Image (cartoon, rainbow, N blue to C red):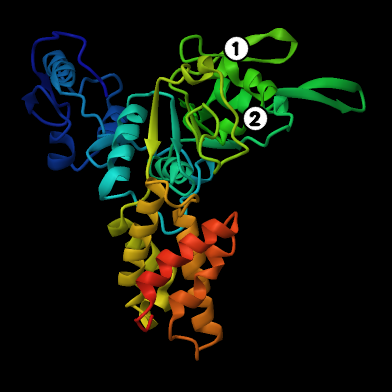
Amino acid sequence: MQKETANPGKPIKCNLCNYTGHSLLEHLPSIHNISTEDYLKQYVGAPTISRAFYDRLILLKKERPQIKQPKAIFQIGRIPFEVHTEVPPEVCLPLPEHYRFPQFGKLKKDIQHAAVSLSSGRSIYISGISGSGKDAFIHALSFYTRRPSIAFQIQPGADISHWLFARAFNNEGTYWEEGKLLQCLRDGYTTSSGKRVPYLVLISDLDRADKSQVESLRLILDSIQKRVKGPGGVTYPVLEGTQIVSTANTTGGGDNRGHYISANPLDSSIISRFEAGFEFHWLNWKDEEVIIKSKFPHLAEKKPECFSTMKTIVETLRTAIQKEELFCDFSHRDLCSWLQHAEDLLLKLPAVPKLLLKKSQRAWTDRLPDPETKLEALRIIDALIDGGSI
C-alpha cells in the first residue's frame, strides 16, 4: 500500500481523472477498472491514500479488540479441563473400553474431588479397592483432555532406576542414557507449533514398591522442590505444570485386611509429598449395570432378568464384606468374571439357561482364598438365587 508523503493531512488526486479524495483503493477498480498495482506501474510513487486515511487505519487497528479463540473445554461433572487440541491422541493414555464417568453414589463424589485437585494442577495419591477404576479414571482424563501422559507400574523387586537413567553402550563404549520418565518430567511434550505441554505421569501400585524403589522416586514426588535427578548427580527442574498421580490399593500403612498381601507400608514422608489423597469406592449399581450390559450384550439380550437378580447379589455380598462377615473382595472385575462365564455358557451351551447365574458363579467362588470364605459366599448366593429360574 502506497501512502501519501506530501501534504499529509490533505486529500489526494487521481492521475487518471479529476477525482479528489483520501483513498483511491475503491475508486481505481470501480471507475477505471484498474488495480492499485497497475496504477502504480504507470505513476510510480503516486499516493493512493492520504496520511489522514493511513493514520485512521492504524488507529482503528489499535482500537479493534483482539479476539482470542476460545479454549476447548472438557468437563467432569462441573469441573472444567482445558483440551490440548495440538497434542496427538497417541501421546495420551488410551480410553478403557466401556468406561464412563460415574454418575451416582460414593464413587461419583470421589472422582469429583480428585477432578478438582487435578484441574488445579495438584499431584495426588488415589487409593481404593481393586476394580474401583483408579487407573481407568486417569486414562479417561488423559484421553478426553488430550493431556500428554505416560504410565509406569511398580513391580516389587524390579530395578526402576532406568525410568530416570541407566548405563548403555555402543561401539564407542558406555554412556548414560536418559530414561523416559526423566525426559517427560523435564521436557514435557513439544507440539508442532513449539509449545511445551507438561506431562501427567501415572505410577500404579505405589504401595507395592520396596524401599529402594521408593527412594528412587522420592525426589520427583516432592511437590515443593519439583526436581528430577539425572546422570552424574545432576538435577533438573521439573517442567512447570507437570503432575504425578499414584494409585494403590492401600493408604500407605500396608495391608490390614489380608486382601493385598503384596502391599508394603510406605514412609509417611512419601505420602505427604502428594498434595492430596482420595479413596475410591465401589461403583454404584446404577453405573455398574450400564457398563456390564455394554460388556455382555448377548447376556443382556437373551437373559435380561439376570441383571435384577445380580443387583441384589452384588449389594448383599458387598455389604457382608464391609461388615467383615465375608473375608474377600467382590470388585467390578470379579463381577465381570462371573458374568463373562455366564455369557460364555449361554453362547457355547444353549441348553444351560436355567439357573445360569448359579452355575456360572464358580468362575468367581472357585478363586476364593479358603473353604470357609467360599462356603459363606455360596450360602449368600444360594439364598438369593434358589427358588428362581435364573
Numbered tag placed on residue 236 in the rendering: 1
Examine the rendering and report whether any part of residue 176 can be seen. yes
Kindly indicate whether the residue at mark 2 contacts the one at mark 1 (C-beta within 8 angstroms). Answer: no
Helix or strand or loop: what does disc 1 sit on? Answer: strand
Residue 171, given in percent of the width and then of the height, sits at 92, 27
Residue occupying image coordinates x 49% and y 56%: 333
Closer to the camera in the image, 389 or 55: 389
- Callout 1 crowding tier (Cα within 10 Å): few <14, some 14–19, many ≥20: some
Residue 38, given in percent of the width and then of the height, sits at 30, 34
Closer to the camera in the image, 316 or 85: 316
Q: Height in image: 327 above or below 43? A: below
Closer to the camera in the image, 98 or 24: 98
Numbered tag placed on residue 152 in the rendering: none
Q: Which amino acid does label 1 sit on?
A: Tyr
Q: Mark 2 points at which residue?
A: 180
Closer to the camera in the image, 136 or 24: 136
Q: Is residue 112 left or right of residue 238?
A: left
Q: Is residue 72 left or right of residue 176?
A: left
Residue 203, given in percent of the width and then of the height, sits at 55, 33
Q: Quadrant of the N terminus?
A: top left
Q: Is residue 137 left or right of residue 42?
A: right
How many numbered markers are drawn? Answer: 2
Residue 69, given in percent of the width and then of the height, sits at 26, 34
Q: Is residue 326 left or right of residue 234?
A: left
The picture quadrant where one finds residue 390 is: bottom left
Q: Tell me how far mark 1 sits from mark 2, CA to CA.
A: 14 Å
